[in-house]
Image (cartoon, helix red, strand yellow):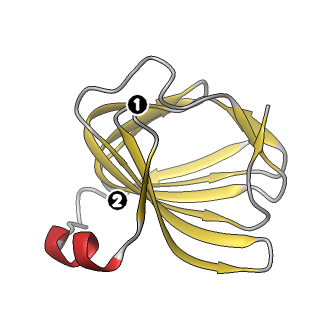
Amino acid sequence: MVFTHDMSDWLSFNIDRDWLDKNISWRDFETGVKLGKLKREDKTSLVLYEADSEVTVDAFMPHMHPGGEAYLVLEGEVWDEEGTYPTGSIVWMNRETTHTPKTRGKTLILVLWPEGVKSA
């Protein structure tokens, strides 16, 4: 099950990209996608995904979240097998949900993995 709500009617974001560039250690997957780790505690991780406006077809591979996944679309648009999530959308995916997300346009996503992520 996927629970989602679009909050773009009343919520907007001011993203300080200079701060992100100075304070986040980004891992560049060379697919047009970068991962920035914000915090990790035991199995729980809070990360940022940044996708260029053009990414490779395999930028995001099929994967599963043992403890579920929550994410907030800060910029751009994310879509997968369950739906489309524009800027301002908050998404919860149940435990052991498998999906293959895609992005449209330059995209920034704040992601919480309660128990990490595994390849599907």
Residue at the (24%, 77%) spot, across then down: 22
Tally the numbered discs: 2
Determine the image quadrant of residue 15: bottom left
Pick the front one: 93 or 103: 103
- Quadrant for the C terminus in the image: top right
Report whether residue 25 is seen: yes
Q: Which residue is mark 1?
A: 31
Q: Is residue 114 above or below residue 93?
A: below
Q: Which part of the image, by quadrant, shows the N terminus?
A: top right
**Circle 1 sits in a helix, a strand or a loop, which is it?**
loop
Please indicate whether residue 96 sits to the left or right of residue 73 in the image. Answer: right
- Which residue is rendered at x = 27% and y = 72% of the image? 20
Residue 112: give x, y in percent of width and height: 60, 65
Which residue lies under the disc numbered 2?
7
* Residue 14 visible in the snapshot: no
Q: Secondary structure at mark 2?
A: loop
Crowding around mark 1 (Cα neighbors within 10 Å: few <14, some 14 to 19, many 20+) is some
Residue displayed at 52% across by 58% down:
71
How far across and down, in percent of the image, does residue 104 sit?
30, 30
Kindly indicate the quadrant of the structure image that contains residue 78.
Answer: top left
Q: Is residue 75 above or below residue 105?
A: below
**Residue 12 picture location, percent across and down:** 20, 66
* Residue 36 lies in quadrant: bottom left
How far, Cα to Cα, is label 2 from label 1?
29 Å
Q: Which of pointers 2 and 1 indicates the residue nearer the eye?
A: 1
Q: Nearer the viewer, residue 53 or 22?
A: 22
Q: Is residue 41 left or right of residue 14?
A: right
Residue type, mark 2 in image: Met
Question: Which residue type does callout 1 highlight?
Answer: Thr
Among the two numbered marks 2 and 1 on one chain, the one whose residue lies closer to the N terminus: 2
